[in-house]
Image (spheres, grey):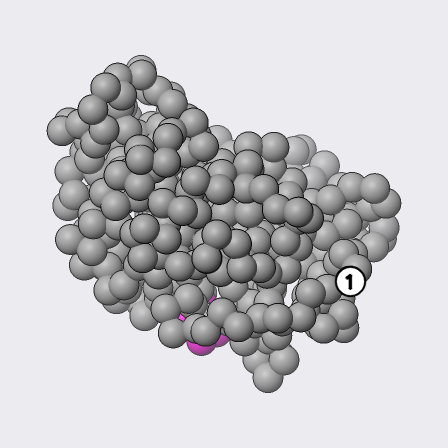
Amino acid sequence: MDVYITNDVEVWCNGWHDIDGEFPSAFRKYIYGETDKGHYGLPFQLEVLNKYKLKSVFFVEPLFAAHFGEAYLKEVIALIQNAGQEVQLHLHPEWTDEALEPLLPNVTEKRQNLYMYSLNEQRTLIAKGKQMLLDNGCKQVSAFRAGSFAANNDTLLALRDNHILIDSSYNETYRDCHICQERPPVHFSNIEGLAELPMTTYQDYPGHTRHLQLTACSFGEIKRVLLDAERKGWQAVVLLMHSFECLTSDKLLPDTLVIDRFEKLCQFLANNRERFTTKGFNATRMDYHIQPKEPLVSNLFEFSMRIAQQAYRRLKY
Ligand SMILES: [Zn+2]
């Protein structure tokens, strides 16, 4: 079974009121994971992945650099590619109105989500994002994920027009995901001429669906979902994390629970590499064809363990 460890890489400046003042420290936190107790951002994550010889995909958000300068984007891309990992395109159009040279004419207010833009506007934003990645050293752009999974079918058409033929924006647990299908593509589908590889979701307790994200699921749950997917004949699973996900939510300290979980996951995948192949998108043929009949499930024991872990984390931080 193929496992895509996807990492969304983005910088946020603690709101929009003083982005220039906040940016230097935001860049150090969101990219390098700087805390008083060490650095736990991208370089740390890349080091762990490489220690276990695993592949990962980094969906890098480039539009922030239309305000702060492309040297920052170049730095991020170099970090990832020099570690032998893959860069793909992530887009948060919240940055559109902050660009020093307008990305779109007449956009002077914040429009947070990609689906709020017309097909033409999405085509332009995706073209600009792709070009910014390529201009700053990215080897190839073959896959995309919308910020906050907030894509619609026009996004897929705009991607196709930009020769990006793999999308991973579908997330059935996100209300802002407006990609329509006759039924949720829980595994993989061809839609609007694209290969759609959705975020993997599972049932964490009866009647509730959760997506497979490092901070949102315990290691026990992630392992159970991987084993369940294998048992049910799934061909691929997509896991989400972020460049800043090894920090606490206030970004002040390393989150030892998540760091431990990340290490355990990498160790598990490395120890079982003949069963689980971690992959990037550039050299992969998207020819998955088996549609699963049942959803993936964890179990109530793992669910209870996670609730206990989260309570411990709240007490600790
Ligand atoms: Zn994002």
Q: Residue 29: x, y in percent?
A: 35, 39
Q: Residue 69: x, y in percent?
A: 15, 38
Q: Residue 274: x, y in percent?
A: 59, 84
Any part of residue 196 in sight: yes
- 68 vs 137: above or below: above
Residue 51 is inside the magenta segment:
yes
State which region is magenta. Answer: 49-54
Residue at image x 78%, y 41%? 208
User: How many labels, in total?
Assistant: 1
Residue 108 is inside the magenta segment:
no
Any part of residue 87 in sight: no
Question: Element type at marker 1?
Answer: loop
Q: State the residue in front, 105 or 229.
A: 105
Residue at image x 27%, y 63%? 140
Neighbourhood count class around disc 1 (C-alpha, 10 Å): few under 14, some 14–19, many 20 upward: few
Q: Dividing the image into 4 quarters, which one contains the C terminus?
A: top right
- 136 vs 244: above or below: below
In this rendering, would 307 be left or right of 85?
right
- 279 vs 161: above or below: below
Q: Dividing the image into 4 quarters, which one contains the N terminus?
A: bottom right
Residue at image x 58%, y 59%? 189
- 278 vs 206: above or below: below
Residue at numbered disc 1: 293
Residue at image x 32%, y 70%? 84
Q: Residue 20: x, y in percent?
A: 22, 24
Ligand 1: does it lie within 8 Å of the C-beta at label 1?
A: no
In this rendering, would 183 be left or right of 28?
right
